[in-house]
Amino acid sequence: MIRTSLVALTLAAAAPLASAQTVSVCVFDVIGANGDFYNLVKDYALEMKAQGVDLTLKPYTDEGVAVGDFNAGQCDAVAATDIRIRPYNRFTGSISAVGAIPTYDNLKTLLATLAQPKAAPLMKENGYEVLGIIPAGAGYLFVNDRSIDTAGELAGKRMATLDYQKDAIHMVNYVKATVVPSDITNFAGKFNNGSVDTAYAPAFAYEALELYKGIGDKGGIVDYPLAQLTLQIVARDEVLDDDTAQKARDVAWHMFPQAMDLIRSQEQAIPEDKWIRIPDKDIEGYQEMFRQNRLEMRDGVNGAPNVYHPKMLSLLSKIRCASNPAAAECTADNRE
């Protein structure tokens, strides 16, 4: 009897280990396995062990290759920027809609909302499921000449533009700048060697990709978030059951403070004199310009690509107006 009980206890103790699920993840970080965002995914994987999921991570410095390997079935999931995630989930892929999240407080409200169980149906699309969203930092405009501090000054300037980012291409054309097709592996080199006048990136790129070289003595970083970039973990929707998938999103949400500490330290590490401050009187005009372009890219009108998900734009509008109800957009007839 005692022996039978001991066997039962042993089997019960071993059960969680026996049921642990292994999930392979292609992880993009432009720095590779030593990068900050790869390390964030490592921490995510550590937390997922408590949920009975063993994530095996494979680092990639080329985001296109990471996504390609995922598509080819070499990984069960992929961790990549929301720009690359759009083919799998247009809703979460619209988080980086141009000018749509002006503050990190707005971003916090959004990600808290998306981590709730009631948002779970929106995490599934096209046979894929979003298992977590982690902030990667606001995207800023890096320029080689500080006089490029208004939309009008961008006319005729050469802009390194990701050739798969349709909304960025549309915006570059809108301000009458010149699109210089680039990808994640070469845009920094083009900016640093003077092949382009501007580039778009989060603050981490200042040091990690040495964008200070392209800035030089005359350039700077325009202190206005053009978009909020995120790292999203996406898997085929049969990889995890619904309950575990929701726990995975909760794990990612609870990493928000850690990710924001990293992002703020990266931004604060940039010398103050490298930032180009935008007057408050100009910001409202930019916000309306971005809003009109978001509407065009929601509806695919006026030559704009059909990129943004209407529900995401509506949610982001509600978040902005809750934090700034006096904004002109909050009473506009064509509110998002």
Image (spheres, rainbow, N blue to C red):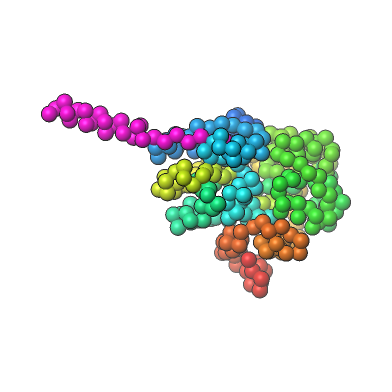
Spot occupied by residue 194 in the image (x, y as percentages of width and height): 84, 38
Q: Is residue 80 magenta?
A: no
Look at the picture and state if 152 lies above or below 245.
Answer: below
Q: How many marks?
A: 0
> Is 88 on the left-hand or right-hand side of 299?
left
> Is 149 on the left-hand or right-hand side of 133?
right
The quadrant holding residue 182 is top right
Spot occupied by residue 140 in the image (x, y as percentages of width and height): 71, 47
Q: What residue lies at 47% left-to-right and 42% top-to-bottom? A: 239
Please identify the residue farthest to the left as the structure is shown. Answer: 1
The quadrant holding residue 240 is top left
Please identify the residue farthest to the bottom as the structure is shown. Answer: 333
In the picture, which quadrant includes the C terminus?
bottom right
Q: What residue lies at 45% left-to-right and 58% top-to-bottom? A: 118
Q: Is residue 177 visible?
A: yes
Residue in the foreground of this view, choosing between 305 and 144: 305
Q: Which residues are magenta?
A: 1-26
Look at the picture and state if 56 lies above or below 129.
Answer: above
Spot occupied by residue 31 in the image (x, y as percentages of width and height): 65, 32
The quadrant holding residue 26 is top right
Spot occupied by residue 93 in the image (x, y as percentages of width and height): 61, 51
Q: What residue lies at 14% left-to-right and 27% top-to-bottom? A: 2
Look at the picture and state if 167 lies above or below 7.
Answer: below
Secondary structure mainly formed by the magenta segment:
helix
In the picture, which quadrant includes the N terminus?
top left
Residue in the foreground of this view, choosing between 176 and 5: 5
